[in-house]
Structures are given as C-alpha cells and as structure tokens.
C-alpha cells in the first residue's frame, strides 16, 4: 500500500485520530514513547518556552475507554481476558491505561508493512504490563528483543534498587525484520 501523506510530514493531535486516517501496511518503523502510567501530573516550569503546558499521567475508566473495552471484548477475546486479569490483580487505573494503549497499538500494527517493526519505550511503572499487551496484539513469537537504556549514576536508594533505566521493546509483524 502507498502512504497517503507526504514524506517528512508532521502531524499534531492524538495519534489515534491521525493513524486512523492513514493507509494500512505502508509504514516501516514506529517508535512509540507513550505516557508511562506514572500516576503523576506534569507541568512545564514558569518562564520556560513550554510554560503552561500540562500533562496528566493518571488514568480512569471514562466512557470512551469503556466503549473501547467493549470493542476489544467483541473483536479480541484473548486481549479482553488479559485486561480483565490486570483489573483483578492490579487496578482499574492500570486497565484503563492499557485499554488506551491497546487501541493505539492495534492501529500501529495495521499501519506496519509485513516487514515492519515497532519499538515501544517504557519504564517500570507499566513496562511488564505493556510487554504482555504487545504479546497479545502482535503475538509473543513476534517479540524480537529489548533494549535497556541506563541513565544517570548509581545512587544510594536505601533498601531498593535505583530507578535509573527504561526499556524499549521491539516487535515485528512478520517476514524480514528491521
């Protein structure tokens, strides 16, 4: 399939709305740096170029996520079972976050060429849940590998290990892998 956009186009807005207007099977590589489900709110500092920008990384089951959940239940029963299990063993908030991510990741899979790959950047807040979500959507046999991105210096974290790394999971659709 041929892309229905020009090379080097910058899109703004919710990536789900943008992706739904794109042709299927025409993307080689997707890098995703989503919200991390940190359960925190962020605001750019006053005086910075981004002053006034805010982002809430907290999740709840609003009407839209409930509708997406019903769609997943009808069309992807194995994914639905996973989301139910997450709600039981973790929380409705984690399930809401994963529903938000699932509908976007399913669109990304639709956009990828048969030789395409997706890289998803995450931290320990929800990384292992996202890995299982990717297994449900892409198939666990399509997991290629993961990259551990270490940053900062070792610090005394008391009785815990320091939180000084992120993970990037790589999945492919099939065929030759980038």
Image (cartoon, rainbow, N blue to C red):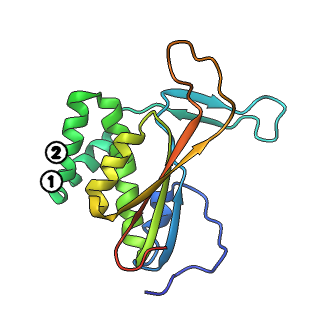
* Residue 61 in sight here: no
Question: In terms of secondary structure, where does tag 2 sit?
Answer: helix
Q: Residue visible at 29% across and 30% down?
A: 92
Picture disc at residue 77: 1
From mark 1 to mark 2, how far is it between C-alphas? 6 Å
Question: In terms of secondary structure, where does tag 1 sit?
Answer: helix
* Residue 178 spot, x, y in % from top left: 49, 73
Is the residue 57 above or below the residue 167 in the image? above
Disc 1 crowd rating (10 Å Cα; few below 14, some 14-19, many 20+) is: few
* Residue 155 spot, x, y in % from top left: 65, 22
| Quadrant hosting residue 144 | bottom left
Q: Residue visible at 24% across and 46% down?
A: 69
Q: 119 left or right of 83?
A: right
* Residue 83 spot, x, y in % from top left: 24, 42
Q: Where the N terminus falls, by quadrant?
A: bottom left
* Residue 48 spot, x, y in % from top left: 82, 36
Is the residue 169 above or below the residue 84 in the image? below
The residue to which callout 2 is attached is 81
The residue nearer to you, when weighing 56 against 136, is 136
The residue nearer to you, when weighing 115 against 107, is 115
Q: Residue visible at 34% across and 54% down?
A: 134
């Amino acid at each position: 399939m041929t892309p229905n956009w020009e090379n080097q186009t910058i899109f703004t807005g919710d990536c789900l709305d943008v992706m739904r207007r794109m042709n299927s099977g025409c993307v080689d590589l997707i890098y995703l740096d989503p919200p991390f489900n940190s359960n925190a709110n962020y605001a750019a500092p006053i005086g910075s170029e981004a002053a006034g920008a805010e982002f809430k990384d907290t999740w709840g089951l609003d009407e839209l996520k409930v509708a997406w959940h019903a769609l997943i239940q009808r069309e992807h029963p194995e994914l639905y079972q996973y989301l139910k299990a997450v709600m039981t063993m973790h929380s409705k908030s984690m399930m809401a976050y994963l529903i938000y991510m699932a509908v976007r990741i399913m669109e990304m899979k639709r956009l990828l060429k048969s030789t395409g790959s997706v890289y998803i950047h995450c931290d320990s807040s929800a990384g292992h849940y996202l890995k299982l979500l990717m297994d449900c959507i892409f198939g666990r046999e399509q997991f290629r590998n993961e990259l551990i991105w270490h940053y900062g210096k070792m610090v005394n974290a008391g009785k815990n290990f320091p939180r000084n790394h992120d993970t990037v999971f790589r999945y492919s659709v099939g065929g030759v892998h980038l």
